[in-house]
Amino acid sequence: MLTLYIFNPFLFELQIQGAYKNDFLGLEFDPLIPGDPKIPGEFVITRMFGIPLDYSKWWDLSAIYLILVGYRILFFIVLKLKERALPFVEDLYSKRTLHILEKRPSFRKAPSFSSRRHQPLHSLSSQEGLSSPLN
């Protein structure tokens, strides 16, 4: 319930109002001073808690269910949008990664400097006249 309060304090407020209406309506409390009339639950709800009694506790409950169903539908829509957008995002990410890799010197087609260690490859037919380890 704490996570619902964090995301929607209105939902928490409706829940508390419905619980107070359910608990206090119809109750009578002993007065603070003996001999005074008993305090009705309606007085406690309206004056002490500031909760209006214009509507029933069932309206509070139906509003809570409506908000929860709305959250479920919103969650479903977000999941479906994520499913449809994921291939597009993966495509963008792969293109960006390939672009970054192409800029690296180690992935260039032509070597940027000559090296004694890494010689270009020659076909065997072009190496006939060279000193070969087989001779």
Image (cartoon, rainbow, N blue to C red):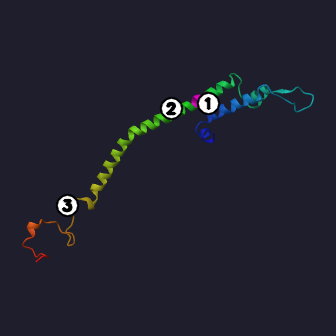
Left of 54 or right of it: where is 40?
Answer: right
- Percent position (x, y) of residue 111? 21, 63
Q: Earlier in the sequence, mark 3 or mark 1?
A: 1
Q: Earlier in the sequence, mark 2 or mark 3?
A: 2
- Percent position (x, y) of residue 20? 73, 31
Dot 2: few (<14), some (14–19), or many (≥20) neighbours within 10 Å?
few
Left of 134 or right of it: where is 87?
Answer: right
Left of 101 or right of it: where is 86?
Answer: right
The magenta segment: 63-67
Mark 2 lies on residue = 73
Q: Residue at x 21, y 59 (%)?
A: 109
| Disc sitting over residue 110 in the figure | 3
- Percent position (x, y) of residue 13? 66, 33
Question: What residue type is disc 3 on?
Answer: Ala
Q: Residue at x 86, y 27 (%)?
A: 38
Mark 1 lies on residue = 64
Q: Secondary structure at mark 3?
A: loop
In the rendered image, residue 131 lying in the magenta stretch gets the answer: no
In the rendered image, residue 64 lying in the magenta stretch gets the answer: yes
Q: Looking at the image, is 117 positioned above or below residue 7? A: below
Q: Earlier in the sequence, mark 1 or mark 2?
A: 1
Question: What residue type is disc 2 on?
Answer: Ile
